[in-house]
Image (spheres, rainbow, N blue to C red):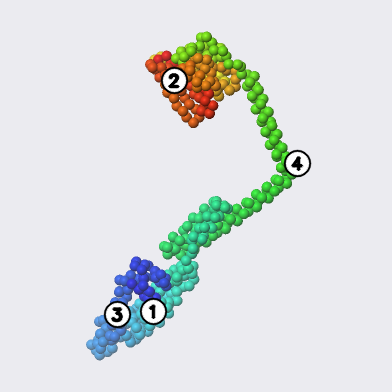
Amino acid sequence: MKCKFCGNDLPEESKFCPSCGAPVEPEEKQEQEQERSERLAEAKQQENQNPYEYGVPGTDNGSGAQNENPYQYGSAEQDNENPYQYGSAGQDNENPYQYGSAGQDNENPYQYGSSGQNNENPYQYGSTGQNTSADYNANNGTYGQPQKPINGTTYLIFAIISTLLCCLPLGIVAIVYASKINSLQRNGDYAGAQNAAKKAKMFTIIGTVAALVVSIFYIIFAVVIGIGSSDFDDDPVSNVVENVIEDKDDSKKADDSDKSDKAAKSTEPAVASGELGTSWDSYTVQINDKVLTFPCTKADIEAAGLSMDTDYTAENYMVNANEYELVYFEDANDNEIMAYAINNTDTAMEVKDCLIGGVSVDDYDLENGGLTVIFPGGLQMGASKDAVTGAYGEADDTYDGDSLSMYSWYSGDSYYKSCEIDFDAESGLVCTMTMQNFGQ
């Protein structure tokens, strides 16, 4: 199919000519226009004198008089004064609402125009040679005028740069509008594309300017602060360095003082009592100078100089039947050990009334000094693997991790009768000791 105005080939299902921008009429409408033009040409050749019939050349109304019927369907060369008749070529029509043809001098601003008409109606369906509204085309992008494409990618690049380097909120708005430009052009909405480009440009500029203004104020503020500080220090840089050195010296002195306090609190490891067992399955542990055999009572641990941390577990906390709860005991130097409060009865009871089924302690819990924990065979924190395996034999289960190695021994009749010794992976020395005997 070809454009009836410029004659160029048209893509299928196109609504506007890509060359001249004119609207494309469907083929059916073009055929109807051609058929209508043929009928009008045929009527032009007929001379109808019958006032009521559709004009036939050479006929009259029966009296020999020519047809002067003002309402007849007229033919060419008739002098029609009927303002409502259907006119043809050659008529002198003064009806402002008639259906016009080629060659008519029509002043009706609402008629359907054809080629060669001098139409001043800005709303009519225009053809080639019509004087359409230039302002309307320029402002709204109507058909008939090819539009200059807008490069949306350029707007998008500047919007992204503004977002990353300048003002994030305004830059995002600019990106949103810039991303719409190309899609609006593909849909034929040139006016919308121009509006989106205008807004993208506006927000990009505003964001860049705002970022520059903020940067300028920040620099001014920093300079003012720098000048103000120089009033107090002749050499600010040297003063800062001196302060850092002094802080390090103070920190070192505090660490040395803390270490001295801990050393003063710590005592020599207690000598293993004769009541302490030699093998792990004796389930004995010496805390300071008191030997405990698990399970024991809460009072037995308190007799070794420890008290239960009620901030962690309240004394009236209920422990269900045949279950256990973790509790903590601490001494006056804030050293602590973890204990297992067990309930071997068939009814719930308060944690303060439960038995203690074992303890677990690590070197971090004893770092304040003043608390000694000795396991069977005289094993304490810092013992070697050889010393442990020499006292307890080969472990039933071992695990070697990145930070520590775990050696475990189990009783054959219960999982809750066991001993676990952990070794630091770097030093290879004991760092954690756990003993359990729930009495089941």
State which mark lies toward you, 4 or 2. Answer: 2
**SS state under label 1:** loop
Which residue carries the number 4 mark?
232
Q: Nearer the viewer, residue 395 or 410?
A: 395
Which residue carries the number 2 mark?
394
State which mark lies toward you, 1 or 2. Answer: 2
Report the quarter where the N terminus lies: bottom left
State which mark lies toward you, 3 or 4. Answer: 4
Which residue carries the number 1 mark?
115
Q: Residue 38 got which mark?
A: 3
State which mark lies toward you, 3 or 2. Answer: 2
> Of the residues under marks 1 and 3, which one precedes in the sequence?
3
Height in image: 15 above or below 179? below
Measure how far apart labels 4 and 1 are at the Cα level.
90 Å
Height in image: 240 above or below 304? below
Q: Is residue 341 visible?
A: no
Q: Residue 137 got which mark?
A: none
Measure how far apart labels 1 and 2 are at the Cα level.
111 Å
- The three-letter code of the residue at mark 1 reads Ser
Measure how far apart labels 4 and 2 are at the Cα level.
70 Å
